[in-house]
Every structure is written in structure tokens, then in C-alpha cells.
Amino acid sequence: MQLRALARNFRPSLLAFAAAPLLITPNLMSAQDTPGVIRVSGQATVKAVPEVMVVDIPITVKNDSYSACSDELMASFKRLKAALVKAGIDEKLIYSNGLRISENYEYDSGKRILKGFEGNIQALVKTENNTKTLQSISGVMANDAFNFGYSLRYELSEKQKEALRDEAMKRAVQEAKANATALGAGLDLKLGQVLEISYEVNEYAPGPLVRNYMMKAEASGDSSDLELNPQEQELSKQVTVVWQVLPI
């Protein structure tokens, strides 16, 4: 027999919580009062506003020569890094995520013609979510020398992930136990010892891990009004608990 119970919603002061439906599948006792089991699956979802922001800056250059393309690409990254540091960004927070140089072809009357080379470096700044820092980066990107455009995404910090995982696990177990107890009471049964427990992690579901904001720096360089409020991100956990059931 299968019964589906809807979990109550919880919203703690620090973490928002929403419980998903629980699937309860009891194996009833025999007429000889042989201990039976009850299996309950519960899922809980918790939310938090991400504390980390990541600014991705795609640097792209083109040149007829491979070596010149490579040199220009590295020079562009070094200039950008120096400008960000001058604007107050900690050098340790500025990274480069790989380098790629490929042949650049164009087609003329059906023929593929080599026009030179294209180089790409994905630069990024990963730091605590801070409006002032974001405005500083935007101000640098407004410079014509760095007219690459950039994107902003938000992530949960490791501390947040750990707290959310613990909270989701605790809430899922609480809901599973509450529903198993209620079901057992309706059948004149009480919960005995836990025989088995397992869990699954569905991180940041059903929403995406990050929310992207694409933007192009304005030539004026006025970024004083740039302020974004990241949306909450979610983490879900599902637990399945098997209890022994005994007559009341």
C-alpha cells in the first residue's frame, strides 16, 4: 500500500525551507504480531542568497601571425590584471581559465581562406559579493582598451553549501519521522528501531547553480549605480528511512 503525504513548509530565520511530498510505503505486520517494517522517503529543499560573485571576462584578439596573436593575447590579460589591481581588486582573486589560439578562416566563393589567428583567454574575478567591488570592475571594463564585455554569476560559498546540506538532511529526516509516526498511529502501530537509512543529494535543484547577468560596460565609465541583488539558490536532499513497527 502506498500513501503520499504533503510535507509542511519551514522557513528558519537563517535558511528558507520547503519540504517536498513524502512517499510512504508500509509493510504491515502479520496476524501473529511479527514485527513489520515501514519505509518512508522524504525530500527537503533549503534556500540561501549566494555570498560569492564570479565575474567572467572573455579576452579575444586576432592577428595574422600566430606568435603575434599569442603575445598580444598575453599582453591584453596582463594589462587587464594590472588595471583591476589598480582599481583595488586583490591580485589573488584574478584568474585565467586557460588559453586557446586557433586558425581564423573566412570563406570566399566556397573556398576556405586562412585569415590569421584568433586567441582567447577566459579571465575571471571570484570574490565575496560586494557592490563596491562590482562597481570597480565595471569601471575598468568601461575603458576602451578592455571592451570585451563580461558576465556576472553568483555561487553559494562552501560554508553556505555545508550549512544547507546539514539543514536539508535534518528537515528531511524530521518530516520522514513525523509522517511515519502519523501513519503508524492510524494503524495502531508504533515505530521501533531504525533498520536502514539512505539519502540522495540534488544540489541547487530545481533552480540553476548560477544565475547569469550579461552586460556590456558603458563607454562613460559611470558604474556608481550598478547594484544587483542575487536570487536565492536551492539545495535538495532526499532521505529514505526504514523503521521496525510494533503494536501499540
Image (spheres, helix red, strand yellow):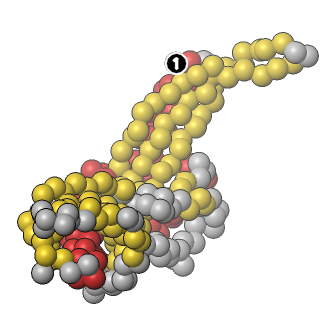
Residue at 12% across / 71% down in the picture?
246
Give the percent coordinates (x, y) of residue 125: 39, 53
Going by the picture, which residue comes out furthest to the left? Answer: 193
Is residue 87 visible in the rendered image? The answer is no
Which quadrant of the figure contains the N terminus?
bottom left
Residue at 41% across / 38% down in the picture?
97
Type of residue at label 1?
Ser
**Quadrant assignment, res 196:** bottom left
Residue at 31% across / 55% down in the picture?
201
Label 1 CA crowd tier, 10 Å (few <14, some 14–19, many 20+)? few
Q: Is residue 173 above or below residue 115?
A: below
Q: Is residue 193 above or below residue 100?
A: below
Q: Is residue 188 left or right of residue 238?
A: left
Label total for image? 1
- Considering depth in this image, is 19 or 69 the residue closer to the camera? 19
Give the percent coordinates (x, y) of residue 126: 36, 55
What residue is pinned by disc 1? 67
Give the percent coordinates (x, y) of residue 198: 22, 54
Is residue 186 visible in the rendered image? The answer is yes
Going by the picture, which residue comes out furthest to the front? Answer: 31
Which quadrant of the figure contains the C terminus?
bottom left
Residue at 48% across / 36% down in the picture?
121
Give the percent coordinates (x, y) of residue 46: 34, 72
Q: Is residue 17 above or below residue 94?
A: below
Going by the picture, which residue comes out furthest to the right? Answer: 109
